[in-house]
Image: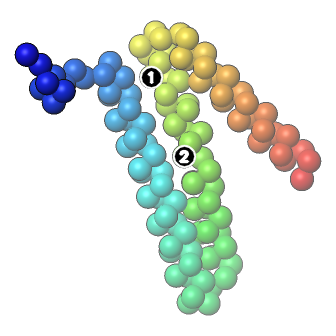
Amino acid sequence: MTTHGSEPDIPSPHEPIELTLARLLRIGSFIAAVLIAVGIGTMLLGKEALATRLITAGLLALLATPIMRVITAGLIFVREKDWRFACFCLVVICALAAGIYLGRVHS
């Protein structure tokens, strides 16, 4: 007799990948938040030039975090020889690179 709550927890084969990617997102978000907060604090102290650099660095860290997530996932998939998902990551990286390139060309 089985009930819904009594099934053993079967670990997902991708659990280490998920934990690694979650840690990467957490660290990237934390770094971005700290840079932006310090930049705002610096702005309140009257140092606009430094504040602008810190806030810009925080925003770049925030934008780079999901890109680093895709790169990290791709490297993990290559290491595990999961070529299908590694190719998906490559396609996503190419799309991101094209978007960044086209965004810079038109601005």
Q: Quadrant of the N terminus?
A: top left
Q: Position of residue 56 (x, y in %)?
A: 65, 64
Q: Residue 16: image x %, image y %?
A: 32, 28
The residue sitting at 57% across, 54% down in the picture is 62
Q: How many marks?
A: 2
Q: Pointer 1: residues within 10 angstroms few (<14), some, or many (20+)?
A: some
Q: Which residue is mark 2?
A: 65
Tell me which corner region of the image, top left, top right, bottom left or bottom right, holds residue 88.
Answer: top right
Examine the image and state in which quarter residue 80 appears: top left
Give coordinates of residue 9: x percent, y percent. 19, 25
Q: CA distance from mark 1 to mark 2?
A: 16 Å
Q: Secondary structure at mark 2?
A: helix
| Residue at left offset 83%, top offset 46% | 103
Task: Give 50 or 21, whichever is nearer the viewer.
Answer: 21
**For the point 53% across and 24% down, which residue is it?**
74
Front one among 54 and 84: 84
The colour scheme used to paint the residues is rainbow
Q: Horizontally, is 52 left or right of 24 in the view?
A: right
At mark 1, the secondary structure is helix
Residue at image point 22% right, 20% down: 10
Give the residue type at disc 1. Ile
Q: Which mark is residue 20?
A: none
| Residue 37 horizontal side relative to residue 101, left or right | left
Residue holding disc 1: 76
N-term-proximal mark, 1 vs 2: 2
Circle 2: residue type: Thr
Residue 63's place in the image compared with 41, above or below, is above
